[in-house]
Image (cartoon, rainbow, N blue to C red):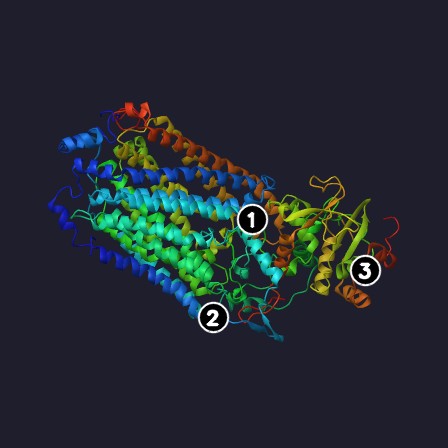
């Protein structure tokens, strides 16, 4: 083999072959999927559009690298314990991701899957506490704290509704007369987490009872 | 295409023979660019491994640097990956391939400043990209974390460096083309195509839905398979027969190995999405390609291990710094590739997917194979560029044992933990928090392995710059630095 | 056997080769070191491909064709579960009488999904943040009290086992069915050292009807309707 054009042709063919077979074929087959109605509800199209706060929250999720420990995909029953664990009532399919400009499937589960976290954990307060210091809600977790997404503000006349409730003699207690409150990033991030819901039927995958 | 070549070698007994005078001139022409790439590679390696250790510590001490936003786990991990990939490995590839291409083409490098210009641009772009990750401009697309704005810079830099490799090939002296040259030339064409398609379809004009994910893994897996692996294999194909002084076992096996790698590796990346939201046929295509990857790995393994077989060869391998690293890499290429094929099977994947097993496997391929072969190649190339020897056999020994021991321990820990983790995750009665707590001990062991490797890198870096500065110790040596100056007499030990 | 300390390769290998020419240019270039230290550039041998390897490759390829034929579902773009179709047959078995053991198992899974993030897998809660369920008087005794909390949630200060807590528990009545609430409460009432009788789904339905849709309880409000049992 000493012919440069020949080697180049072979090299080009192999990569073009895989690109056509995997990517172009996929693009043609399911790259233009549209939203669909769930069968019992003829009026709403799923997946839902995200709110503005949730879209901003997704940027926080991306910038902090949450993806490196949390997946957003639910495997079918025989391919893993995902459904049995309650990470979703059905497996995820291509249509669930069509509205996402960046698809954040993830490949590592140092933490649990988040594809359906919006139906599993509805409490803002839990999320704030968990982000502020995971040891508060989940002692022994390996998740890092995201205290830098919070700030201390003076208590003033009223305690803010979203101020974090902390146990007595806590290591990161606020200064006297101050309270820890989520910054914009933290509240956006929680809105994004709330928007992650797998609670609708898709033509390709139905919710299990 | 294959069959016409053998006649050539029957005419001349040593088709690849380069008159030593030429070799000296060729090395001299390559000196500055290759040294530049190697020096950058070593500096990035130090930074990358430090970030690797920081990330590892964070996985058993989450409060470690917990208040620093720029150094939160997601970012240190991404910086680690991008630095070792685009900083260390790419610079290593640039240096090794440039040297091999001209040595094997039997021509001097002309206008080396173009390659240096490209190299400078490349390293500035990587530094900017890493800075972007640090400041939160990360994309969270695996293997493409650097902000998309640096992509054009990287592309231009690559164009300069890659072109100079191809030009080197085009200008080669007439005669035989050796297998290493095929691999390098192919890699030089593959990478820009992969990178441009991935940048376009994921970051600049994103494809819709999970087509993006397929593109992502087509790219990410092929960076290893069609860029780092080919150059690693090329270096092994060069260094093993070169130092042993015997021909590689079989030309025909080389050809099968090359084309089957080109054909199958391309499709294998989808196995990162098994069970995911892509149609079953695409997953199965990735699985089948991963199984077929046994073919190139097997024939390449036969070629290498048959060439190195024999007691006398083993003595040389054990004694030569170059070959000790390279043959360690060759073994791990075989091992990690077979493991990779097995992991693609649905039955295995349901346990190992999403666990530390995969992380361990990534390091097995990227480090125990790729990095170790690159170390070996650097040990071979540096004395030829500088015209002096490595100053200290002891430092090479420390480097070898810390890195080889470290990666062995690391892969072992990650594989065992990965299996335990995967089985626990598939058992819904085990609370997730318990799995998380159990991981602490294993992650601590993982830090120990990573620290050993990092210390090995420090030894290497010290040695590298010591040699570069031209210490007295390195000038004083008149013969290659080997592990043992008093080799046991044959028949004495065994 | 000669020691090899003087060359990177065995000395005998070098002596096998013809002495390499050594020009002045070379001596200038590399201090003369280049000449003796290297073998010629590598070359290939031409050993034939072993038959067994060819056979093995053919077997592997046929396996892959077989695999593709059985695992691609006609290259459909809408099949995401490789065992689609098989699952229906498996799930069609006749319903069996549900034992307490099965209910506890279901309850445990639900608990790990829905409750353990706050009350912890061992039911002990988190000191100062989330109250425990283990030996809690709110859990034991009259099931209607616990059912009411799960259905409508509970917010504000509460004292459990001598410690006070101030947090919000979200309602689970809209996402969990009566049977599920019964199972998970049965599990809680019989785990972590608790020993109370199982909860029937009918009881949950009854309480749900009674309280209807409402905002989360406060502890005082709840205790007015369902006071803690004496002696607890």
Foreground: disc 1 or disc 2: 2
**Which part of the image, by quadrant, shows the C terminus of chain B?**
top left
Q: Identify the residue at horizontal 61%, vertical 42% (top origin).
A: B67
The residue beneath circle 1 is A110
Left or right: C136 in relation to B385: right
Chain designation of label 1: A
Q: Residues within 10 Å of mark 3 (few under 14, many from 20)?
A: some
Label ID, residue A32: 2
Front residue of this view, candidates A127 and B166: B166
Chain designation of label 2: A
Front residue of this view, candidates C76 and B113: B113
Foreground: disc 1 or disc 3: 1
Give residue C203's position: percent from left, percent from top: 79, 64
Label ID, residue B174: none
- Give the structural element (helix, strand or loop) at label 2: loop
Foreground: disc 3 or disc 2: 2
Query: Spatial distance from mark 1 to mark 2, Cα to Cα?
Result: 33 Å
């Amino acid at each position: 083999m000493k012919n440069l054009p020949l080697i180049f042709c072979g090299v080009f063919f192999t990569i073009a072959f895989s690109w056509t077979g995997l990517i172009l074929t996929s693009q043609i087959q399911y790259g233009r999927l549209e939203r669909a109605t769930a069968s019992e509800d003829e009026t709403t199209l799923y997946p839902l559009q995200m709110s503005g706060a949730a879209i901003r929250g997704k940027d926080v999720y991306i910038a902090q690298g949450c993806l490196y420990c949390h997946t957003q995909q639910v495997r079918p029953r025989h391919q893993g314990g995902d459904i049995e664990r309650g990470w979703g009532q059905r497996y995820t399919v291509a249509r669930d991701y069509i509205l996402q400009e960046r698809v954040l499937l993830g490949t590592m589960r140092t933490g649990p899957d988040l594809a359906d976290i919006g139906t599993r954990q509805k409490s803002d307060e839990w999320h704030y506490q968990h982000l502020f210091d995971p040891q508060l809600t989940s002692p022994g977790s390996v998740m890092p704290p995201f205290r830098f997404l919070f700030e201390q503000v003076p208590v003033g006349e009223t305690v803010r509704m979203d101020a974090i409730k902390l146990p007595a003699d806590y290591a990161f207690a606020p200064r006297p007369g101050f309270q820890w409150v989520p910054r914009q990033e933290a509240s956006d991030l929680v809105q994004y987490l709330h928007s992650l819901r797998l609670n609708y039927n898709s033509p390709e995958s139905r919710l299990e009872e | 295409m294959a069959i016409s070549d053998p006649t050539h070698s029957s005419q001349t007994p040593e088709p690849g023979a380069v008159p030593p005078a030429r070799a000296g001139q060729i090395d001299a022409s390559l000196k500055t660019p290759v040294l530049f790439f190697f020096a950058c590679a070593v500096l990035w390696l130090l930074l990358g491994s430090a970030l690797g250790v920081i990330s590892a510590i964070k996985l058993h001490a989450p409060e470690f640097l917990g208040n620093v936003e720029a150094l939160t786990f997601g970012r240190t991990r991404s910086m680690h990956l991008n630095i070792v990939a685009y900083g260390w490995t790419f610079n290593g590839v640039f240096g090794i391939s440039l040297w091999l291409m001209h040595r094997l083409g039997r021509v001097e490098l002309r206008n080396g400043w173009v390659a240096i210009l490209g190299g400078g641009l490349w390293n500035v772009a990587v530094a900017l990209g890493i800075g972007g990750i640090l400041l939160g401009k990360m994309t969270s697309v695996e293997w493409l974390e650097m902000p998309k704005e640096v992509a054009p810079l990287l592309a231009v830099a690559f164009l300069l460096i890659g072109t100079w490799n191809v030009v080197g090939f085009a200008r080669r002296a007439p005669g035989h083309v050796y297998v290493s040259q095929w691999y390098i030339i192919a890699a030089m064409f593959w990478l820009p195509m992969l990178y441009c398609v991935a940048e376009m379809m994921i970051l600049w004009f994103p494809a819709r839905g999970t087509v993006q994910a397929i593109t992502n893994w087509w790219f990410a897996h092929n960076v290893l398979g069609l860029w780092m692996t080919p150059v690693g294999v090329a270096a092994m194909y060069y260094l093993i027969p070169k130092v042993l002084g015997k021909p590689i076992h079989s030309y025909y096996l080389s050809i099968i190995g090359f084309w089957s790698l080109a054909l199958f590796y391309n499709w294998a990346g989808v196995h990162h999405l098994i069970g995911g939201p892509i149609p079953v046929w695409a997953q199965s295509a990735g699985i089948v390609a991963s199984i077929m990857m046994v073919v190139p790995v097997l024939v390449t393994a036969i070629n290498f291990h048959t060439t190195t077989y024999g007691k006398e060869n083993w003595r040389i391998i054990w004694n030569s710094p170059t070959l000790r690293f390279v043959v360690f890499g060759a073994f791990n290429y075989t091992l990690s590739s077979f493991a990779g094929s097995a992991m693609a099977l649905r039955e295995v994947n349901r346990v190992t997917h999403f666990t530390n097993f995969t992380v361990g496997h990534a390091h097995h391929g990227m480090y125990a194979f790729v990095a170790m072969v690159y170390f070996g190649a650097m040990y071979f190339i540096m004395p030829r560029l500088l015209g002096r020897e490595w100053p200290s056999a002891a430092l090479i020994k420390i480097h070898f044992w810390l890195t080889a021991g470290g990666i062995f321990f690391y892969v072992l820990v990650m594989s065992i933990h990965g299996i335990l983790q995967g089985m626990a995750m598939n058992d819904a009665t085990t609370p997730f928090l318990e799995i998380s707590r159990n991981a602490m001990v294993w992650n601590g062991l993982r830090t120990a392995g990573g620290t050993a490797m990092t210390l090995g890198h420090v030894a290497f870096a010290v040695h590298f710059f010591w040699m570069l500065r031209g210490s007295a110790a390195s000038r004083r040596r008149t013969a290659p630095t080997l592990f043992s100056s008093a080799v046991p007499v044959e028949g004495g030990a065994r | 056997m000669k020691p090899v300390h003087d060359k990177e390769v065995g000395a005998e290998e070098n002596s096998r080769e013809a002495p390499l020419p050594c020009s002045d240019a070379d001596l200038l270039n590399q201090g003369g070191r280049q000449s003796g230290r290297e073998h010629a550039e590598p070359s290939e041998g031409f050993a034939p491909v072993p038959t067994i390897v060819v056979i093995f490759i053919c077997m592997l390829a046929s396996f892959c064709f077989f695999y593709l034929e059985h695992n691609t579902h006609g290259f459909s773009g809408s099949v995401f579960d490789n065992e689609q179709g098989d699952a229906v047959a498996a799930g069609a078995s006749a319903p069996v009488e549900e034992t307490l053991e099965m209910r506890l198992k279901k309850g445990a899974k639900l608990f790990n999904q829905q409750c353990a993030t706050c009350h912890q897998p061992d039911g002990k809660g988190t000191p100062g943040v989330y109250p425990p369920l283990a030996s809690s008087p709110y859990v034991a005794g009259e099931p209607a009290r616990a059912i009411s909390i799960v259905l409508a949630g509970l917010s504000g200060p509460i004292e459990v086992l001598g410690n006070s807590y101030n947090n919000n528990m979200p309602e689970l009545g809209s996402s969990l069915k009566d049977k599920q609430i019964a199972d998970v409460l049965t599990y809680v009432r019989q785990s972590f050292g608790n020993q109370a009788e199982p909860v029937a789904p009918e009881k949950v339905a009854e309480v749900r009807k009674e309280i209807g849709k409402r905002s989360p309880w406060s502890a005082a409000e709840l205790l007015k309707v369902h006071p803690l049992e004496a002696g607890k």
